[in-house]
Image (cartoon, rainbow, N blue to C red):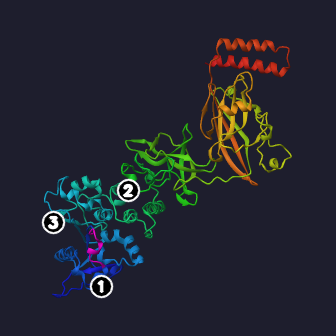
Amino acid sequence: MRLLKTGPYIPGAEKLELIEKWGVDIPHYAILSHTWSSNPDDEVLFADVLHGISTTKPAYPKLEQAMKRAMLDGYGWLWIDTCCINKSSSVELSEAINSMYSYYKNAQKCYAYLVDVDASDHKKINSEFAKSRWWKRGWTLQELLAPASLEFFASTWHSLGYKDELRPIISSVTGIDDDYLRPPPPTNPFDTVENPGLPVEHASIAKRMSWASTRETTREEDLAYCLIGLFEVNMPMLYGEGGQRAFYRLQEEIMGANEDQSLFAWIKLEDDKTTINGLHGLLADSPRDFRHTGSVIPYSALADYSVTTVTARGVSVTLPLTQKADGKMIAALQCPVQGRYSDWLAVYLQKLNIGSNVYARADCNKLASVSERGKPQGLYVRQPPNFVPRTVYPDHFFQLRSLSAHWEDSELAEYEVINVICDKSRYALKGTSQYRAIPLAEPQRWILAPMIYRIDKTEGALTATLVMRRKTDGESLLLLLGAGRDLSAAFGICEFGDVFPTNIELQQVFRPRPAGQYMELECHTVRVQVEEIVRLEQKIYFLDIEITARSVAPTASEMIEDAIDAIDVFHKPSVERKAAKGALLGKLKRFRLT
């Protein structure tokens, strides 16, 4: 640590004296907090002290008065960022920035010089004191919070008072709670502090970010670098990387040191244009994204979740997920909803590539809440949310894997695939090289049609239509399988009359919907989940079909028609008689249930 000697100097001597000390050898010192001149060359820099030209610089009076004030208070040494850091050395600059919070915290006294304040009515919210540029600078946030003793001075070096006595106006100007402006409890058990405040590290990550949300820095990267000490992390300075990238790195360091998930509780303002197609990564772009979420607090770790890390696939995190009807996920954070502490704060996620387990944050202008958390799942959230490249293979296939049906009466929840409508060229036939490459699922009793279909990869193209029937009452539906955008699997459902529609007719009504969405008909709600598997340069989409049976009371005319059908097929083969009888009995059963 480099320190400037406050005096006394030999009369007429123009060269100031600097010393370097480390660890326990560092003497007691005072420290200056200020805003730089609009022209940085006006300040007294490290090179100016070395060359003995400090007194020629326009900002020398500021330095001189700070030295005099420190001498009057009994401090022989002063730290000031302008001349105690050799900014021509990137190594020294990085070390100083990583240590700066501790410099202010360990100083015996800090002088905050407000060059744009002259008035004496500094305890009013509309005073020059409240409007000073000092409150808007990024670096001065840590300079406000870290020192135990902080005294404010006007441009004339007239004392405006101490931080402790100015807490009400400071809290109004900065949004920082009074608790964090009072002196914290002493570390020495023999010392006493009347009405101690809270240590800054007790504030949630979201709260600390909100304190920085209205502040600015000259260099965009500094909006991240100036917060390093506030979050008790370290990181190298990479000027030129850009403010957004610097802030991502800061959050990555915070994740490695703190499990506080309020880090993910940020929102974008309506006029923000930084999302990609409405999607975003899990990490915020700037402290400004926390402007309205400073009240969020975290719970302690409630489960043995995997540690959140950053990987090539995105942020690896374990979160409880609940699926919405539109296919999006609600991911619960370990943070309560303010005022409703039995509910959980949550964010919206959207899967990027079906089956890839890679998500992006959606609906970034709001947070969600859930009263019950879903099952914890490990997932990746890309940062930024560019879509995972979808590799094209010569052949893509659908393969039916599972069917699950639900209903309060289990007898109504039996479905089967009785037929398929498609071009025969879409079948993956046994004995072909295509068929041998496919990892087969076990044959299922509910599939009375081929299990595997080669996909037409054209966007919006229909590959095959499964004819599905509820066994108890004969209610049927068509499940359409096809291709969506970016080679994704897509689906649709519809009903049909007495005659099967043709493949051409079905193509005309096919409106592709992504996997995971609920699709509703009068008597059925259907959802198709997909898992992608690549084998021997072929991509297979394993389909898991979920159907919820819905009971709708049949009309009298429907029951009469089915009774007539049952009589008409009396002399026909037993299979048709059983089907007609089953349809009639099924409708009677639904009639009783409703």
Question: Magenta region, mostly helix, strand or loop?
Answer: loop
| Type of amino acid at the residue the image marks with label 3 | Ser
Q: Is residue 541 left or right of residue 102?
A: right
| Type of amino acid at the residue the image marks with label 2 | Met
Q: How many numbered marks are there?
A: 3
Locate residue 9, reporting x and y percent.
19, 85
Q: Which mark is residue 209?
A: 2
Q: Identify the element where label 1 is drawn.
A: helix
Mark 1 or mark 3, which is nearer the start of the sequence? Answer: 1
| Placement of 111 over or under 44, stated as above or below | above
Is 376 part of what is drawn in magenta?
no
Front disc: 1 or 2: 1
Is 37 part of what is drawn in magenta?
yes
- Residue positioned 80% across, 20% down in the render: 578
**3D distance between C-alphas at marks 1 and 2:** 38 Å
Locate residue 177, reporting x and y percent.
29, 53
Q: Identify the element where label 2 is drawn.
A: helix
Instruction: Please state the extent of the stretch shown in magenta in the rendering.
Output: 36-45
Locate residue 429, reporting x and y percent.
83, 43
